[in-house]
Image (tube, grey):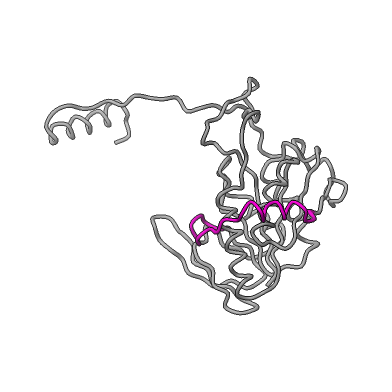
Amino acid sequence: MNIIVCLKQVPDIRNGLQIEESKDHIREAGLNFKINEADDYALQEALLIKEKFGGEVIVISVGSDRAREVLVYALAKGADRAVHVRDEAIAGSDGFVVAKVLADVIRRLSYDLILTGVQSEDEAQSYVGVAVSTRLALPHASSVTKVEVVNAKKIGVEREMGGGQLEVMEIPLPALLTIQSGICELRYTTLLKIMQARKKEVKILRAQDLTLDRTELGNDGSRLKIVEIGFPESKRGEIIAGEPREAVIKLIQRLQTEAKVL
């Protein structure tokens, strides 16, 4: 079974973030970057399926030069081929443009299944994978927590629904799944394998290699425009004193008269 996995490089925010003076993007100087967590689980799930049923795993990333690191990481873990779409014309693209680029690349590849993370850690918008499936006219399932290959033409999935409910379904192949973190146990690679993977070929695609017009890329082609980003303002809460029954009555009164939500 041939599987394509879409990967994104995201900032490692454990050491904190700073915002540029323009207030439209974070300051990248001094930041470390890593593979998006949900994408890592999608990659691991693809490798597990490959172990059982054979085939190959192809990884794709759209991003700047440093995004090559997530592809090297994937190759070190066992991916067979890597494609890196990088071009200044793509810089500043929103998720819809990234989905168009990914779909354009995927159309020229042979595959049975496409896996993406359910969402990225930096933007958490959850629509890129679904947008790719729409552009490729593929059946899809989102927030998948379990995958089972039924046969060469069908795959079974379990997906999270609202309120803690789970949905079980079978989907015809080829299909696209957005994978939830925790679907499997991550396996970690070694420094030696990463060093060896740096010597492997990563296919580079530029804007001119795509069938998309340049006006469809970058800020010009994006539907989402970032006006300003900032940190949430900290707000202090208020403790309502008194016995529990008395405090509840006061709370209800204030919700009715002040907050006007009841």
The residue at the point 58 percent across, 46 percent down is 120
Q: Is residue 199 magenta?
A: yes
Q: Does the magenta stretch include residue 166?
A: no
The residue at the point 74 percent across, 40 percent down is 64
Highlighted magenta segment, given as a residue range: 179-202
**Residue furthest top in the image:** 21
Q: Looking at the image, which is closer to me, 51 or 192?
A: 192
User: How far from the left and from the top, in percent, is residue 10?
Assistant: 61, 42
Q: Looking at the image, which is closer to me, 163 or 40?
A: 40
Q: In the rendered view, does 157 fall on the left or right side of 92?
A: left
User: How far from the left and from the top, in percent, is residue 149?
Assistant: 58, 74
Q: How many marks?
A: 0
Q: In the rendered view, does 145 fall on the left or right side of 133?
A: left
Q: Looking at the image, which is closer to me, 210 or 36?
A: 36
User: How far from the left and from the top, in percent, is residue 215?
Assistant: 82, 40
> Which quarter of the rendered picture does the N terminus lie within?
bottom right
Vertical placement of residue 173 versus 201, above or below: below
Vertical placement of residue 134 versus 56, above or below: above
Q: Secondary structure of the magenta portion, mostly?
A: loop
**Residue furthest front in the image:** 192
**Residue furthest right in the image:** 208
Q: In the rendered view, does 70 fall on the left or right side of 254?
A: right
> Which quarter of the rendered picture does the C terminus lie within?
top left
**Residue furthest bottom in the image:** 151
| Corner quadrant of residue 52 | bottom right
User: How far from the left and from the top, in percent, is residue 207?
Assistant: 84, 45
Q: Looking at the image, which is closer to me, 92 or 136?
A: 92
Vertical placement of residue 244 versus 62, above or below: above
